[in-house]
Image (cartoon, rainbow, N blue to C red):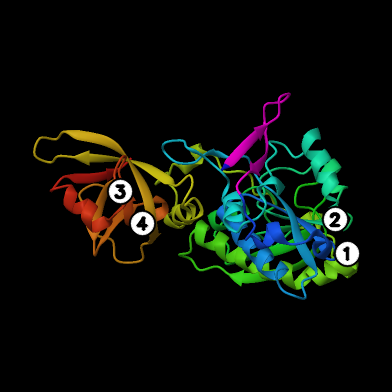
């Protein structure tokens, strides 16, 4: 049974505590004497992509010749994730619990600078912290605790796209190349010396969730490859300072950015659809017109999958008319371009392909707004 312990002073969740027996767990049953021979690593992460990094660390730490152990995990507090707003652990916390990791070593401070958390964190005597999409800024008090410092897996080629949404902003900009960086964490956002990086080419149809998964998978490999040099200190000597003149920012995405304007070029809209896939998605206002009586209805249409239309433009009676061509909805866009929409979703319905949506119009016209 999992029991949540709350602070009487701040009324904030501190950690998971579990009173169920877990003697079979390799984590719970490992003698402290054997664990203390390895470097003590604390992992900080929250979303699903971070869970894949944690899996890689668990796997590597269980090897007979492993240099480290996962001493603790720090993640975002439980929150309501489903429609029913059921309170559930973060994906990282859930993955750790599923693996049998001791629940009293999973910390969930609202802010990493909380005094109660800092006391517990210091008592762990961590030698290295690894962050991967933790979602909380680490204050200097935290950064000073691990003797070997803190390293971060950041899904961009630093100093490009520092900030909360590097993958989304890179796709929005239509980059042809991106990558993942392993860098030391400093107080300034994503500005620490870079230990190593991995470059990849960006397919023009890949969406943000898939690219995030790919980059964090490669980031896990990069981390495991560099851990020996981090532990022996050589990583700090070889790490390169970032060129501040080349730094760009990747600010957090807001829901109001999800609206599409068909006055823009098709390539701009296509890149935005890829970038905002998953959350917050991309939306457009469209008008459905009944040609028999002239009545019209404006509705919101979520645009799921697109590509830039390169075929001959279908003839239409109005510049705002959306036409159907070979399984796609063709939206006229700015500068005489067109966007090919392959999947859409009406409010309260499931995602459907363009053919199913067009058939559902039953002869009504579709216009962009």
From the top left corner, tell me how far across and down residue 36 is, in percent: 84, 61
Other residues around mark 1 within 10 Å, as few (<14) / some (14–19) / many (≥20): some
Per the rendering, the mark at residue 338 is 4
Q: Nearer the viewer, mark 2 or mark 4?
A: 2
Horizontal and vertical percent position of residue 214: 57, 66
Residue on which the image places disc 2: 149
Residue that mark 3 sits on: 350
Which is nearer the N-term, disc 2 or disc 4? 2
Badge 4 element: strand
> What is the secondary structure assignment of the residue under circle 2?
loop
Q: Position of residue 201 (x, y in %)?
A: 58, 71
Q: CA distance from mark 4 to mark 3?
A: 25 Å
Using the numbered discs, state the Cα–Cα distance from disc 3 to disc 1 in whole angstroms: 50 Å
Kindly identify the residue that appears in the image at 76 percent across and 62 percent down.
69
The C terminus: image quadrant: top left
* Foreground label between 1 and 2: 2
Left or right: residue 124 compared with residue 285: right
Q: Nearer the viewer, residue 330 or 274?
A: 274
Disc 3 or 2, which lies upstream in sequence?
Answer: 2
Q: Alpha-carbon distance for marks 3 and 2? A: 47 Å
What residue span does the magenta drawing correspond to? 2-20
Residue 218 seen from this side: yes
Foreground: disc 4 or disc 3 = 3
Residue neighbourhood size for the residue with mark 2, other residues' Cα within 10 Å, grouped as few (<14), some (14–19), many (≥20): some
Q: Secondary structure at mark 1?
A: helix
Residue 114 against residue 335 in the figure, above or below:
above
Instruction: Evaluate if marks 2 and 4 touch, with contact meaning CB atoms under 8 Å apart.
Output: no
11 drawn magenta = yes
């Amino acid at each position: 049974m999992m029991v949540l312990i709350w602070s009487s002073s701040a009324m904030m969740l501190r950690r998971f505590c579990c009173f169920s027996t877990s003697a079979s767990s390799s984590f719970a049953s490992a003698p402290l004497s054997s664990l203390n021979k390895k470097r003590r690593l604390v992992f900080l992460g929250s979303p699903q992509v971070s869970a894949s990094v944690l899996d890689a660390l668990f796997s590597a730490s269980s090897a007979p010749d492993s240099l480290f152990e996962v001493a603790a995990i720090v993640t975002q507090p439980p929150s309501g994730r489903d429609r029913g707003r059921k309170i559930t652990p973060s994906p990282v916390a859930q993955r750790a619990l599923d693996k049998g990791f001791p629940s009293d070593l999973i910390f969930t401070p609202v802010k990493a600078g909380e005094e109660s958390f800092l006391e517990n964190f210091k008592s762990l005597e961590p030698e290295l912290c690894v962050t991967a999409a933790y979602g909380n800024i680490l204050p200097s008090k935290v950064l000073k605790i691990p003797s070997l410092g803190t390293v971060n897996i950041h899904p961009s080629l630093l100093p490009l796209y520092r900030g909360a949404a590097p993958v989304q902003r890179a796709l929005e900009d239509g980059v042809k190349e991106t990558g993942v960086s392993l860098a030391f964490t400093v107080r300034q956002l994503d500005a620490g010396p870079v230990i190593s990086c991995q470059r990849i080419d960006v397919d023009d149809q890949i969406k943000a969730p898939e690219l995030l998964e790919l980059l964090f998978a490669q980031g896990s490999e990069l981390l495991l490859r560099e851990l020996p040099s981090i532990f022996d200190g050589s990583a700090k000597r070889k790490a390169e300072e970032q060129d501040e003149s080349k730094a760009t920012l990747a600010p957090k995405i807001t829901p109001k950015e999800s609206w599409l304007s068909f006055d823009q070029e098709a390539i701009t809209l296509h890149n935005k659809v890829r970038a905002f896939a998953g959350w917050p998605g991309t939306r457009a206002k469209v008008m459905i017109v009944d040609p028999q009586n002239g009545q019209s209805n404006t509705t919101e249409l979520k645009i799921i999958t697109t590509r830039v239309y390169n075929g001959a433009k279908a003839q239409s009676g109005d510049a705002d008319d959306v036409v159907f061509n070979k399984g796609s909805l063709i939206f006229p866009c700015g500068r005489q371009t067109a966007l090919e929409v392959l999947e859409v979703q009406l409010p309260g319905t499931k995602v459907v392909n363009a053919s199913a949506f067009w058939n559902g119009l039953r002869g009504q016209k579709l216009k962009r707004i």
